[in-house]
Amino acid sequence: MTSNDMDYLTIALPKGKLFEHSVSMLTKIGYTAEGLSENSRKLVIANEAEKIRFIITKTADLPTYVEYGAADIGIIGKDVLLEGNKDVYELLDLKFGFCRMMVAVPQALKQEKLSDYAHMRVATKYPRVAESFFHSVGIQMEIIKLNGSIELAPMVGLAEIIVDIVETGRTLKENNLVEIAQIHPATARFIANRVSFKMKFDRINKMVEGLKPLIESESKA
Ligand code: PRP
């Protein structure tokens, strides 16, 4: 960590579904910067007066930035955290971005039991989570890692099954897929780099204390 890094608090935000709500929560507790937008071409946006720096990352990469201390703190989905298995502190459940990790198949391929799918191909953005789920239920599968639009894979014969997140259920429905097993629920989490949490404890703790009542009030709303 350079002395310049010590002066700033660097906050990583993920592009995509969690971005807007993350910015809104942080703004409500006084952390923002001019031009902080998901569509910004600038990937580092600073608030010089407050000595805050925002970085905008691809979702799956965010825990890596925090693990290595390139960002002190960040907001990311529990699904991504579980898949990435990075060495970071998970400080708060922010209780937004509700979704669940599940297993789904095309309606026409639905079998009676999970074990009827043994040795079939599973398309997923979450190979670690999928592997560990099927291992836990004693079924061996062939895992195919994809980077998005997972629902496409069974429609074109790349895989028979998918492991993915579902939020509203709309994507499953529109592609004639049905959920056959739940893996775990997920929400957005506030995470910190282990060294930053010690070195910048006062600043990070102030954010945590600011976020707590906001999480409470938002989850009651
Ligand atoms: C996620 C997920 C599903 C969809 C679920 O994809 O992978 O495809 O959202 O949401 P729903 O239940 O509300 O329809 P995302 O939009 O993040 O993009 P991706 O397919 O490129 O990963």
Image (spheres, rainbow, N blue to C red):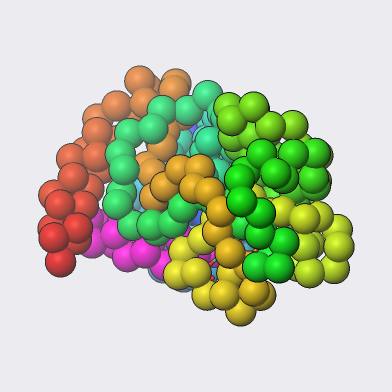
In the rendered image, which quarter contains the C terminus? bottom left
How many marks can you see?
Answer: 0
Residue 207 lies in quadrant: top left
Rendered location of residue 168, percent (x, y)? 45, 70
Q: Is residue 27 magenta?
A: yes
Magenta span: 16-32
Looking at this view, is 186 or 84 the one in front? Answer: 186
Is there any visible trace of residue 145 in the rendered image?
no
Spot occupied by residue 214 in the image (x, y as percentages of width and height): 18, 54
The answer to whether residue 95 is magenta is no
96 on left or right of 80:
left
In the rendered view, would you say 81 is above or below 89?
Answer: below
Q: Residue at x 79, y 69 (%)?
A: 155
| Residue 78 as seen in the image, left or right of residue 124 | left
Nearest the eye: 56 or 168: 168
Q: Quarter-wise, where is residue 44 in the image?
A: bottom right
Residue depicted at x 65% and y 68%: 107
Q: Residue at x 39, y 44 (%)?
A: 189
Quarter, ligand 1: bottom right
Residue 50 in view of the camera: yes
Where's residue 90, x and y in %? 38, 32
